[in-house]
Every structure is written in structure tokens, then in C-alpha cells.
Amino acid sequence: MNMTAPNAGLSRRGFLKLSAAAGGGLLIELNLPGGHALAADAGRFEPNAFIRIGRDGVVTLVMHKVEMGQGTYTAIPQLIAEELDVSLDAVKLEHAPPDPRYAEPLIGAQITGGSTSIRGAWKPMREAGATARVLLVQAAAKKWNTDVTTLTTRDGVVIDAAGGRRAGYGELVDVAAALPVPTTVTLKDPKDFRLIGKPVRRIDAAGKVNGSARFGIDVVRPGMKIATVAASPVFGGTLAGVDEAAALKVKGVRQIVKLDSAVAVVADHMWAAKQGLAACAPRWNDGAHARLDTAQIFAHLEKSSEGPGAVAHRSGDAAAAMRTGARRIDAVYRQPMLAHATMEPINCTVEVKPDGVDIWVGTQVPGIAQAVAAQTAGIKPEQVRVHNHLLGGGFGRRLEVDFIAQAVAIAKQVRGPVKVVWSREEDVQHDMYRPPYLDRISAAVDARGLPVAWTHRVAGSSIMARFFPPAFKDGVDPDAVDGAIELPYVIPAMQVEFQQVEPPAVPTAFWRGVGPTRNGFVVEGFIDELAASAGQDPVAYRRALVKDGRARKVLDLVAERSGWGTPLKPLAGHRAGRGVALVHVFGSYIAQVAEVDVNADNEVRVRRVTCVIDCGFAVNPLTVTAQMEGGIIFGLSAALWNEITLADGRVQQSNFHDVRVMRMNEAPQIDVHIVPSAEAPGGVGEPGTSVAIPAVVNAVFAATGQRVRTLPISGQLKST
């Protein structure tokens, strides 16, 4: 899932505000770009994002990000703890409430996504910690009537070595709160880091292992009922009727709630709700899309893509250069719809009260969740209280709020709190899908086989036009072409176009690195085609084109660490091959080499993936490695097997048997190598997926000689 918004500057005068915290203490308010700090109001504070240091010395960070497995609840506290000079376990976390002042600086909205968490927090969080430390040292100097230059800090204590005095931060907060805020602070030299850059174990891991971590689906409220739902199996269909009497005969069923396009059964527990839903046997009016199928969607994409699109990028005269090349190479790439299939199914708990609405949910967009809940309930946004939780997987699905609107609509008809939980089948068949795309790509090459001209036309859905309309300008969706424009290669003349082609009635949404994930497959697949056409080694071909030293370094290192060029030993009767891919996305440079085995039945097994990443300064190397591993597994699952298809207007897949997630016994050996770097951090949540898909596709070509231009790979290979 990738998003684009105006890039607000991270340095701003008045960035930090100091005031007395409720109950005593030091409050450091982070005024993130686009917002403003709030003063005390009736004894409580509502900052944009803040560090609160209490008299007990506890540091509380109110997080403007959510944790969905990407490690932000460890890495962001590392930034603060480092500069504040406290241990990591001294930092406690609170979820931020919905408020536009918690906007992510790189996006301009209160969103967790786009691999932005560490990139956006890198400077502001360190400055916040450093400012707090400076003020606490000044407070100690004032208390002891000594010079600040004689004092040091360590593990939440200010130390006067000459005078033999020590004071914990909690003892100093009242004095510190009355001091003027410094306009500038000096951040630590990286050579002095004790936490940043160190492999720190995830602080949320223990709770997830022992079951104490609370996700949205774990919410329990007094008197709470459970509801499960069925929506029209055809997009745009409506509810025609239900057997309400039969459903109410099921023990534990309390109520049937009918909506325009769905029905919910409310019960004492999930099993009763599920049995009641089966008994009510909903009937549907299918509507206008009852005959829609996948072939129609791609036929529409195919025809539409033949015409010109809106120009997203132009450098040189690609049309003229196409005519001067020694040869021209053309290809069409196709990619299917994909479901998110998060481990935690869709759920939302709602209680409608006289003074407003409470919702308990795991969401990547608390502000949007609050707004849609208010709209559905017919109240003001400030009357909606959002209780955010850990997310059992997001991947872009929990950027959407369709299920929150549905849960509120149900709760309006239920007395007391109700937890709405979708079955896995409902989740798969009523997802908001990664869109289908068709790409037409061409290159003219010189006598050496190197490209002199490059054209790329992307045809598909514009998620930005719906999700963030201001970003959709002049007919171009910036996400849809992300990864297709800023290539790591020198190409003299290049033109990239976008053509908005929406699949009829099918809801589309971001999916773990949408633009770069898609375009990585197309661009790196096509670069591999050019290398093969030129009769050149794929790594050497890329190296001749690469324009950036950081890109060249990861490419060289992945070739070395993977044993590129050494022979592979396939199993008897099998074929083996290596494939390489290189991307520069989300501020990071990544290269991967995949090794595959293809048996006589054309079944592909990925044996090993070598990954090299330069993500700038790696705040927590363990998290970087974990995100590469998870992204690779996510990408391989999609590349090998997954697609969402329609027949008679209905999604044909339903659960993990046909939306496959790579199992442990299928997973390859994954070797991750992090390039040491002093550059500002890049993203790591999504880039791994972007590279894995083309790397395995290129490995399949090396093994079989067959070029896969349509995903998934399964079923594409022909017997030879």
C-alpha cells in the first residue's frame, strides 16, 4: 500500500511545546507538520503527539501510528529513548485519539501506511527526546545551582559527578516544566547511539505469544452481543428477503438486522450467530452485475489500454527514439485482483449511547474511522470515541472503513454493545481488492541491446481518485505509476502513461505496496526480457544500466551473497534457475535473487531467496530483517498462486484453501543482508514484496525458458 501526499517539512519553528502535565510532570508536545499544539484544558491535554514524563519518571509516548506487525511500537520508542537517555522499557505507549494534528508528516493525514512510520518519525521523535533531556538537565542545574556543562544523563537520571549528586527525571519535571523551550537542540552523533541501530527484540512480542495482547477481535464489553453478516454475493446487489422466524429459533439468536445489501444475525455468541445466519437463508436481488466475470474485466482493460493515457512522466522524445533503435521489443503484462486475507478477520465493536458512539476496532485510519462512524450514526465526529487496538494484519485492508460503517449501521438497531465479526468467507468475498491491471510496455534497443527508448502504459483502477482525490491530478494516479517512473536505470528517452479503467462495481483498495509491487513485476520482468534479448547475463545487464551508487552496491552484493553465476543442481527430472530483481521504492534500495525448482508437472518451488537492502540508517536491524522476510513470503504467495476471480458476478475464492498463504514447509531459505548506511531511513514494510515477485518470475524463466507475463505463475507454464 503506497500513498502520496505533499511532503511537509520536518523542521518547523515552534515544533516542541512545553507545559505542565496533568497531575504534575513534564509534557513535550510534538507539533507535527500540518497541525498545532494545544494548551491545557480543564486539567487534561490533547496534544498532536506527545511525550509525557510523570513525577514517577515514567515516559509515556502517545503513538500517532498503529502496530500491525511492522515493529513501530519498538522502533519509534527507540528513537525517543535514545535521545532522552532512558532505557527502552521506561517508555510506555498509548494509542493516539483521532485528530488531524496526528497527521503523518510524509502523507498529511493520520494514517499508518506507505512505509512511512520511521521515515516520518526519524527527526521529530529524536528532537522531542533531545529537547526533554536538555530541559531536565537545565532543571537539575537550576536546582543544584551548577553549570549544565558539568552534568550528564544516564538511564533516566541526571548526574553531577563532581558534586556527587544524582536526580531521577521524575524529581525534576516540575522545575523543567517552567523553563523556556530551547529553539534548537543537538542530536546525538550516531557513534554514541546505544539503542538506535541496535537489534532490539520487539516489545510487543511477549504479549502476542502469551495471549495478553489485545486486538480488535478480542474486545469484550459488559452485555455485549455478537453479530455476523452476509452481504449480497454480487457487487451492487440488494437484500430481497430472509427467513427471520427460522433464524430466531436457533438457541442464542436475539435479533435479525436487515440492511439494504446485507443481513446481520445478532446472538449471544459467534456460533449461534453463524448458525442463525445459515438458518435465515438470505435471498438476493443480484442487480446489474449478475453476469460479470474476470474475462470481461480483462477484455475491457485490453481494449481501453490500446488508446493513449494521461502522461505521468516524460523525459526525452520516446516516440522519436523508438524509430531510431536497432530493434523494438513489446510486451503486455497482466495482474489479477488480490485479496488482503489478514490473519485477523474483519471486525468492529460498537455501542450506541445517548451521548455518542464508542467503537473498538483495529484501524490504520482512526480519523477516517471516526468520520464515517459519525456520518452513519448521524452525529458529530467529536461524539464518536475510537478505541484503537493492535491490528492482526493490515496490508491496506484496514485503511478502509466499509466494515466500520456497516457495524455502526447494525449497532443503531441493537441495544447495548455489539461486536460485528465477518467470517473468513465473508472477508475474502467482500474484500476491497488490489485492482486488476494491464500494462503495455515497449523498448527500442541499440546494437548492444541497451534501451534507448522506453514507453509504459498502465491501465487500471485509480485508488487515489477515491481515497485521496487531491492527489489524482490531470488524469494521473501517482500510486498506480509509483515504481514505473523513478527507475534505478539510465534510459535516454522515456514516457509513462496512466489510463484509469475501473472494474465495474468491484471495490478496489491499496494492497501492500500497490504501485511499486505491481510495477516491480512489470519493470523488472521487462528488464529481464531485454537482457535475454541481448543475450546478456541479467545481473551484468542491469549493472550496465544502473545509475545510482547505492543501487549498484545492493546489486553487486546480492550477486555475491547468492552465488550468482555458480551452477545450480536440480533434482532428478527437475529444472532449476536463479532470477534477480532490483528496485528503488519507498526510499530504500533492494535487490533479491530467487532460486527456484520446477518439477515435471511445472510446479514451482522457491528454494532460496537472497535479499540485500539499503534502507538508510537501520533503526532496528531485527525489524528490517523480519519485514524483508514477511514481505518476501507475502509476495511469493501472490506470485505463485493467488488471484481473485469472478463468475456470474460472484467471487469464486472463499478461504485459505484457495487464497493460499505460503506454509512453513513451503517457505524458502531467506538470507537478508543490510547495507550499513548513514542516510536517513527508508521504508521497509512494503519493498520486500515489490522485489520478490519479479525475482521469482525471472527465476522461472531461467529454469524453463518460459516468460511469465500474467500472474499468478500457477497454470501459466506449458509442458515441453
Image (spheres, helix red, strand yellow):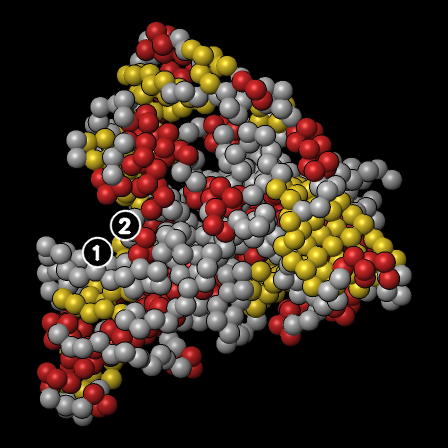
Name the amino acid type tagged 1.
Glu
Q: In the image, is residue 161 above or below residue 158?
A: below
| Quarter of the figure with the C terminus | top right
For label 1, the crowd category at 10 Å Cα-Cα, with few meaning under 14, some 14 to 19 and many 20 or more, is: some
For label 2, the crowd category at 10 Å Cα-Cα, with few meaning under 14, some 14 to 19 and many 20 or more, is: many
Image label count: 2
The outermost residue toward the bottom is 162
Q: In the image, is residue 341 above or below residue 20?
A: above
Residue 232 pos. (x, y %): 48, 21
Observer able to see residue 657: no
Residue identified by numbered label 2:
97
Observer able to see residue 474: yes
Q: Residue at x 89, y 65 (%)?
A: 447
For residue 584, what is the image quadrant?
Answer: bottom right
Residue identified by numbered label 1:
46
Q: Residue at x 46, y 47 (%)?
A: 468
Secondary element type, mark 1: loop
Q: Residue at x 71, y 46 (%)?
A: 308
**Which numbered tag is attached to residue 433?**
none
For residue 676, what is the image quadrant?
Answer: bottom right
Residue 184 pos. (x, y %): 30, 79
Q: In the image, is residue 57 above or below residue 475?
A: below
Q: Residue at x 52, y 70 (%)?
A: 616
Query: CB of mark 1 within 8 Å of CB of mark 2?
Result: yes
In the rendered structure, the answer to whether residue 347 lies left or right of residue 558 reads left
Which is nearer the eye, 355 or 535?
Answer: 355
Q: In the image, is residue 15 above or below residue 661?
A: below
